[in-house]
Amino acid sequence: MFSRAYKSAITLPPLFWVATFLLTPYALLFCYSFWSVSPAQIIVRQWNLENYRELLRVSMYPAVLLRSMRIAASVTALALLLGYPLAYYLSVHAGTRKHLLYQLVVIPLWVSYLVRAYAWKTILGSDGVLNTLLQYFHITHHPLGFLLYSPFAVVLTLTHIYTPFVFLPIYASLEHIPRRLVEASQDLGAPPLETFWRVILPLSIPGVLAGATFAFVLSLGDFLAPLLLGGPSGVMISNVVVSLFGAAYNWPLGSAISFCMLLLVVALLFLTERLEKRWSFS
Amino acid sequence: MHSALPKSAVALGEQPVTRPAPLLSVRAIRKRFGQTIVLRDISLEIAEGEFLTILGESGSGKTTLLRLVAGFEQADSGEIWMGGERLDILPPYARRVNTVFQQYALFPHLSVFDNVAYGLRVQKIEKAEVASRVEQALAMVKMTAFVHSKPANISGGQQQRVALARALVNRPRLLLLDEPLSALDANLRRQMQIELKSLQRQVGIAFVFVTHDQHEAMAMSDRIALLRGGELEQVATPRELYFRPATAYVAQFVGQSNLLRCSVHNGIARCQSLQWSCDLPDGNHTLSLRPENVRLAEPGTAPDNVRFHAAVRDQAFQGATDLLQVECAGGPTLLVRVPAKGPLYGELEFEFSVRDAVPAPDSEES
């Protein structure tokens, strides 16, 4: 047993951290979302629901939120499509190359986010690598405009950035499946593909859920990729929040949007955790 | 084919002419992992409905042999045939062989029912038949009450039964069991040994049972194949193995044994201070003498018995019998099993019959 003093000594610093840097800002955010801005650009601490009404009244906000969710969902789907086979290959077939390949997947995580986003800019731009190549080989005669400054560019970049986050938990859950379960399935007459559907996939669901949650939540709140590569049609909800807190100087409305997103994400995490629990067997 | 065998084959103690063709035939199997040779030239036959145990220490290659039959490993050379069909070229899922794994390997995400139904569903068997066969199999192992449980919520012994039902429900021609009882505690293990043996008689499927526990092997098997360092030391019935061990290693591994290293000259065997007349050729021999074949000397016993005086050095009470360690003046020291009738002290006279000292040559160290 640990003494009470020891327990407080190790729990107090993190508690202090959480209280100062998480709970207080959230509480402030919550308060701000019920205040308003006077015509003289002063924040008035008068409690009202006007910000939330505005979110429902101005169709731009739900539309951008929906677009953000669509982009996040596309990123999640693509990252799963790329990450799962990769994780499966590494876990089952890579053999001695496993560790090298694992490092190759993880190393991009060490590269700055900005650098990777800019890299896509130079690839997708109208004078970029891709358009130049397409014209050089006479596949197109003009630069393709939709490549950059579009939701497409945002989805592509975010998929590139968040695929390792999907890969890692899936890989971990595949590595945790005992080899003998796969053998038992084959022993009972199931060929490899059937073994995959009946045993491997169900047992890797916790990893899939964790990875999908990472990809969805992180890309839903992303604002750099849409800022750098999204253009007007690729604006996401975080860009709206940033501009409300910045140029528009409407902190209360920005707080209301932020708070809605916070609720959305918390609900999502709650849901996936429930699902993960149902699918974990240890 | 077999009726063409000459009559003398029977007289020489070969299997009788009526013996059916073997179900499984392992032919000259070799297997190595990297630099380590795991199996050298293993040949073995298993009859329909037979309970064969592969017995050996850890590292003897017994599990590898089982995995070769199941299809989880590929032999470097040799063949495996089952019922006139070559087995070792088929993938594991195409072999009519099922395995009960050491840690049971039940699917954690499936209920007991779904685990047992797994093989049948893979074979696309009709739903109603699946249900009735699963129920039958679960009834056979007395697990009907746990149909809806998840493997994590039942005990090790119960998981064991489910694993058995999951394999048997497919009506394999051969069931492989990889140390299935080793994770159970001693009492449960003895109970399961009896149940497993009677279950095997009931279903009539050939069992290949892998264990390192000689008592388990002796209690359950029709025949035992004793593996040592990747080689078959002896394949025989438990009784043959016990009373006629082919080598000194067998004698020591199966039950306890005194190994008498003696030299024979002109029909007289000498082992340190003991000597007796025998019909072995001249030279050095190792004889195996079971502790229970040595007894306290009684007056008027057979003249060819070897009698000797020895001092009791240790006495271990083992229930119905006592195991003594006795030392002859001038050697050797022997294990002697006598009926438990109370403490024994000092120097006593013992005897054994020359017939019970059976040759058990030392095999080459591998």
Image (cartoon, coloured by chain):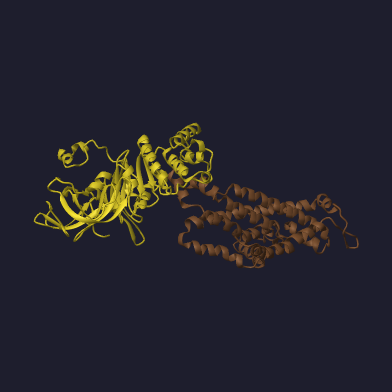
At x 47% / y 56%, what residue is drawn? Answer: A93
* Furthest-right residue in this view: A40
What is the number of callouts on the image?
A: 0
Q: Colour of chain B?
A: yellow
Q: In the displayed structure, does residue A110 sit left or right of residue B46?
A: right
Tell me if residue B27 can be seen: no
> Where does residue B38 sit, x and y in percent of width and height?
33, 56
Q: Which of the two residues, B263 or B33, is positioned nearer the viewer here?
A: B263
Which chain is drawn using brown? A
> Where does residue A23 sit, x and y in percent of width and height?
74, 60
At x 50% / y 40%, what residue is drawn? Answer: B112
Tell me if residue B147 can be seen: yes
> Compared with residue B245, is residue A239 higher up or lower down, i.e. above or below?
below
> Where does residue B89 sit, x and y in percent of width and height?
36, 48
At x 60% / y 56%, what residue is drawn? Answer: A166
At x 31% / y 49%, what residue is drawn? Answer: B79
Q: Which of the two residues, A212 or B104, is positioned nearer the viewer here?
A: B104
Q: In the displayed structure, does residue A9 sit left or right of residue A59?
A: left
